[in-house]
Image: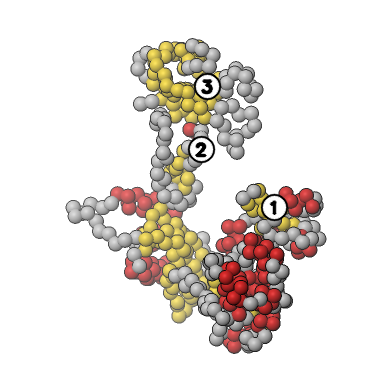
Amino acid sequence: MERWRRIITQHRTPPADDVPVVLAREGAHGPVIHAMNAAARAYGIAAGARVVDVQAIYPDLHVERADAAGDYKLLERLAHWARRWCPWTVRDGQDGIVMDVTGAAHLFGGEAATLRDMATRFKMQGLSVRLAMAPTRGAARMLARHGPASVVGDSETLMAQLAPLPVAALRLSNDMLRLLTRLGLKTVGALADVPRVALMRRFSGLPEDRNPLVLLDRATGRAADPLNAPPDAQVWLARVRLAEPVIDPVPQLPALADALCADLAKAEQGARVLRLTIYRVDGEWRSRDVRTASATRDPAHLLRLLSGKLDGIDPGFGFDLLTLEALRIEPLSLHQDHLDGSRDAGRDVAALLDRLTARLGPEKITWSAWCESHLPERVETRVPAIAHSAAAAPVVISERPLRLLDPAEEVTVLYAVPEGPPARFQWRRVAYHMARFEGPERIAPEWWRDKPGTRLRDYYKVEVQDGRRFWIYRQGVLGDGRGGDPMWFLHGVFA
């Protein structure tokens, strides 16, 4: 909710704190609640409930659309940022981070001091957190979500701390929670007090991540539950440190480009997005980004792209550090020119696109790309050449003309039958008599983009008496309630 409030504040005034607000995402049977503020939580609203059901009980509920993808990315970034406290961190579900601080807590003054430091630094980021530290990952997860705030568990009193928690803290399925509730096992302590022999027979066929006894053993340390943290993402960065501040960064660029391209060549990678950053002696920094049409690790080409990006940089009193970082990389295998000495024309075109875009801007250098649309005139669009690879041609089910008129031109037709193809039509003051035809191919309006009342189209491929072939369509049908008589247009010419 903090991320949503921070974003919404930039555009409009958010609801007051006492207004129940929920964020909704798409569910199997309509929108469901993804997150809620404190006022909605006080009403007893829980995540996963259907929005229509909750609105029926609380008509004053304020509903906003959730950005689950943005929340996921933020949580991934926070998981890596949390490695300031330990090297083993990983995202935990949709709303948590697990950190293995074994052997690292003493660096911050002990376990309690570590939790206080975590709470302070998350608050500085504008985020509220619930923290817990325990000998096992499962116990820490349970205490953080269902126990008191900022608790530190220990091996001797761990079971006593977990006993009053609800069995939902074990992250069980809804079916398992209903079963345990019917059996009267509503708390972790009640589950632990039942003889294990009877429960093991009942739960023996369940997977380990759904078996409540296995999950309880992991939380109490009877079963292993190691943390498998992913490694840090590799940073492709070259830097140059200077003994004295300088004003002109150009003499330092060749060394930066050579060092970065050498590292990329060892890994058979190429750069698509690069960032040059200069750090001034007054503590300020300036950066410039460049993009390439295809992956490259040619130092000379990178220098040509960077040369036009430095004119507007204010060096201040000078700078003593420069970095060149590859923000986006792609695999680029080692290759050589042809045996006859000729070069790959595609590489030359990509280099030309890079230089033109760097000089004129990405909005000036574009090419055609395909997009999903029912209407022929919307299938092709213009996109920046530097940011998109050449798009493959779409799958064409029926034959379409390669040459379209933009916009389609109205024609006058004479009907053979009211709902049939034209027997004769006039286009650009010339009359054409139809010899044969194929169709119709009906294309309905795109209701998610077109205005209400937009009429459908019936396309015909017609061949006139002199052999020429045209693509014409009737817009609307008689009695569709969306206008008067249908109109005819010529949209394309076949080769």
Give the class, few, some or many, for how many residues have Cα within 10 Å of label 3's Cα (few <14, many ≥20).
many
Q: Please indicate whether residue 144 sits to the left or right of residue 488 in the image.
A: right
Residue 67 percent coordinates (x, y)? 62, 56
- CA gap between label 2 and label 3 equals 19 Å
Q: Residue at x 66, y 81 (%)?
A: 159
The residue tagged 1 is 50
Q: Is label 1 in a helix, a strand or a loop? A: loop
Tell which tag, 1 or 2, sits nearer the viewer: 1
- Residue type highlighted by circle 3: Arg
- In terms of image quadrants, where is residue 338? bottom left
Q: Is residue 237 above or below residue 243?
A: above
Residue 44 percent coordinates (x, y)? 77, 61
The residue tagged 3 is 474
Q: Is label 3 in a helix, a strand or a loop? A: strand
Q: Residue at x 57, y 21 (%)?
A: 477
Q: Please indicate whether residue 212 sits to the left or right of residue 416 in the image.
A: right
- In terms of image quadrants, where is residue 263? bottom left
Residue 109 percent coordinates (x, y)? 63, 88
- Residue type highlighted by circle 1: Arg
Using the rendered image of the protein, determine whether residue 251 is visible from the camera's viewpoint. no
Q: Earlier in the sequence, mark 2 or mark 3?
A: 2
Q: Is label 2 in a helix, a strand or a loop? A: loop
The residue tagged 2 is 373
Label 1–label 2 contact, CB within 8 A: no
Give the class, few, some or many, for how many residues have Cα within 10 Å of label 1's Cα (few <14, many ≥20).
many
